[in-house]
Structure formats: structure tokens, C-alpha cells
Image (tube, helix red, strand yellow):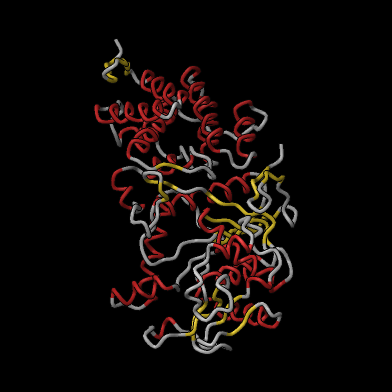
Amino acid sequence: MSLRIYNTLSRALEEFSPLIPGQVRMYVCGMTVYDLCHLGHARSMIAFDIVQRWLRASGLAVDYVRNVTDIEDKIIRRALENGETIRSLTDRMIEALHQDADALGIERPTHEPRATDYVPQMLNIIEKLESKGLAYRSENGDVNYAVRKFPGYGKLSGKSLDELHAGERVAVLDGKEDPLDFVLWKRAKPTEPDDAKWDGAYGMGRPGWHIECSAMSCALLGETIDIHAGGADLQFPHHENEIAQSEGAFGKPLAKMWMHNGFINVDNEKMSKSLGNFFTIRDVLKEYDAETVRFFVVRAHYRSPLSYSNVHLDDARNALKRLYTALSLVPAQEVAVDWADPYAARFKAAMDEDFGTPEAVAVLFDLAGEVNRSKSPEAAGLLKALGGFIGLLQGDPERFLQAGSSALDGAMIEAQIEARSVAKAAKNWAEADRIRKELLEQGIVLKDSPTGTTWEAAQ
């Protein structure tokens, strides 16, 4: 089976064929580094870490760019609040990002460009757009993109210009000829620090957010790339605007495929700093080990919403224990994966269908059951090898199991019972049955009654 990827642009699964045989050029929008990364950022980093891992496992050479936005309104405000330079703030936050990503087993990208190193390239694209009539200078000194002059605007998000116009606030135009237009170059304000300004053809100022990624992607990967990716919240307006800029300037498709990961939700709302409902990666890692957090993310499909709660993380920890328990039974023999093996073939089929990690994880559990039955070092080796393709099961089994109780304690059991109650309330009977079966395998018997659910150790 060949690899198929869901393309947001076409809204369909498409067979993946690199523009250059054997090579993949992939750009993922990274973090705006004014604060610590939260679990929503972790999900995006993990999702596309798995994508690049599987592309490489499929025999492809991957040139992977994940940028850093190190100049933006929020960064300027935070630096001023802290009484420090922008560079001091962004250096600290980039170092923190690396620490968090490394802890979660996220491999470093091939390139990690900082936006501030590509201002000349941004100005070059803006000048191209102006020469083609797609950009104009405003009275306030800004340079804006003329959205209505770009045919096809809205093709990624599926939004028509009329729909977008209906939702616009027309009271404040900020020097724009049309409310839909967006800024390419912001004229410097007297109150802004010197390290937030660059001199160029449009006077002292700084780039708009969207032009940054167009410039970095083109400079490092070329005018047309294989995959452009990021969180679902970037689909509009950020990625839509990138298309308008890059395709307007160069007259070529920006990317062959567009990928977007789903949100992590808290109480049915997207986890975000603007809503204040976020949990930083390092705060979560104070309570849970990094591999459990990674497994919590991996066992959901990257495009699906993922609900955050301690109950779900506890469940992830217990499920991961089952895999490590199998590996603790017999030393894993190092194996070269034979993709004709039934387990390996199922794993590959899952990953080749839009990086289907939930199905791939199910294969790991089936294989763990085989290890439990057969005590085969070869089966254990295959379990470890397949887990490695998604960044799991590479630790020492005994150390992982000893990090917490090898048996469920009361609080963990109650958390599982609560997760089962939530599943039953949602009529997700398969999930409720899975939790009951998992507890039974660990020696815990559940008893349902009209007044609730109790548990006892199996006799």
C-alpha cells in the first residue's frame, strides 16, 4: 500500500508522491516565542515529528523546516513588560522550547530558522507583490496585501470573499483599502524599542506575521514544496495569507499538500494562551513522565480533537505500562523489521493511511499480547522496533515500571472508573468495555449497581 495523506486543500486523502523522487521538503509553522510552550504546542510538534519519522522510515530523505517567530506584537509587549531586550526574551524561550521538545522525544528539525534572520527576503517578496499590484502603501506607512486582487483567495479555508467580508469589522481599517487586506510591513512606532525595527525600502518598520513564513519557506526549501503544515487554527488566516503572498509573488503553488493537526481541548474549548485555559509542557511533566504525555497524544489521530484531563493522562500511563510490562518479561532481541510479518504489515498499513497512529498503537497492544503468551525475544524486539517509529518504548522497561507502582493504586482505579463513566455517558460502549477489560487484566474487578460502580481485587 502506498502512503496516503489527507490534503486540507483538496479535502481528500491523496496518494503522496514527492515532487523530487526520494526527497521530501516539509515546512511546519512553529512557535511564537514570548512564553513557555503549552500542551497544544506539544501536540503539533509531536504530530509532525511522527510524520517526518515515518517519511524517513519509508525510505525518503526529509528536509524538515520548523520556524521560530521571534518578532511579533506579543513578543514586543512581553519584552517591555520584563524590562529586557527582545533577543534576551526570545533566546530564553527558544532554549525552553528545546528542553521541552527534547523531553518529549521530539527530534530536532533539519532547519529551525528565526524570522529575524530573513527580513531581507521578506522585503524582496513584498517588493515583488507591489510590482504586480498585489501590495500597496498606506497613508500610515504600512504596506498591505490587496486580497481581492488575488484570484482564488479562500481556497484553503473554503471561505468565499463574500463570506469573509460579511464577518469583517469595517469600523477600523487601519489604513487599509479593504477590511480583508492584511499587513505585510508595519511602520515603526516611536514607542517601540530599537530592536523591533529594520530599515528598508518602506522605511523603518518590521514584517507582518504572515510574510515571515513565506520568506523562510522559500529561502530554505524553494518556491514550491511537498508539505506545508501546522495547527488547525493556522488554516485561516495565516496559511491562506501565505498562499496569497507566495503564489502572488512567484506564480507557483506554495505547497503540494497541506496538513493540519487538531486541537487539544479543555472543557470543549481549544487550549490556548488567549483563553487562559492552557497547561505548559513543563507543568504537565511535573505530574506525568514525558513518554506518557507523548503516548497520550500519539494514540489519537493527529487530525482529531483531543480532550485534556488528568483522567485521560492516567489512562495513558496505565496503557503504556501494559506495553512495558510485556517488554519486561523477556529481553527484546534486536530485529530488522520484516514488513511481511503480519504485525508489521498491519502497523505499516495503519501508518500509510494518513499516519493512523490509533490503529498502529492497537497493533502494539496485540503484539504485546503475543509477547505475554509466547515469551518470544523476537516478538519483544519487534514490539520495541515498531514502537520506535512513533517515538515510544525505547526506554528501559524496569525503570519505567518502577517509576510508579507496578499495580494500580486506589486513586488510579477511581480515575479509570470515572473515565469509564464518561465513556458510558457518551454512549461510547467500546471505550467503556476497553477500560473494564484493561482493569480486569490488572486484577481489578468492577461491579456496577444503580448507585454507582465499585471495585475489588480479583480472587
Which x, y percent locates residue 299?
Answer: 48, 37
Drawn side of residue 283 relative to residue 199, left or right: left
Residue at screen point 44% across, 51% down? 42
Q: From what the image shows, is residue 214 above or below residue 354?
A: below
Q: Is residue 70 above or below residue 398?
A: below
Residue 71: x and y in percent read 45, 74
Nearer-the-camera pick, 88 or 77: 77
Quadrant where the image shows the N terminus: top right
Decide: is 433 above or below 219. above
The x, y position of residue 369, in whole percent, is 49, 22
Residue displayed at 60% across by 27% down: 343
Left or right of 145, for residue 439:
left
**Residue 407 pos. (x, y %):** 30, 25
Give 313 or 208, whichever is nearer the viewer: 208
- Residue drawn at x 54%, y 45% as measured from the top left: 303
Identify the residue at image location x=52%, y=74%. Answer: 208
Side of 277 relative to 181 (left or right)? left
Image quarter where the C terminus lies is top left
Q: Nearer the viewer, residue 365 or 167?
A: 167
Q: Residue furthest top?
A: 459
What number of labels is visible?
A: 0
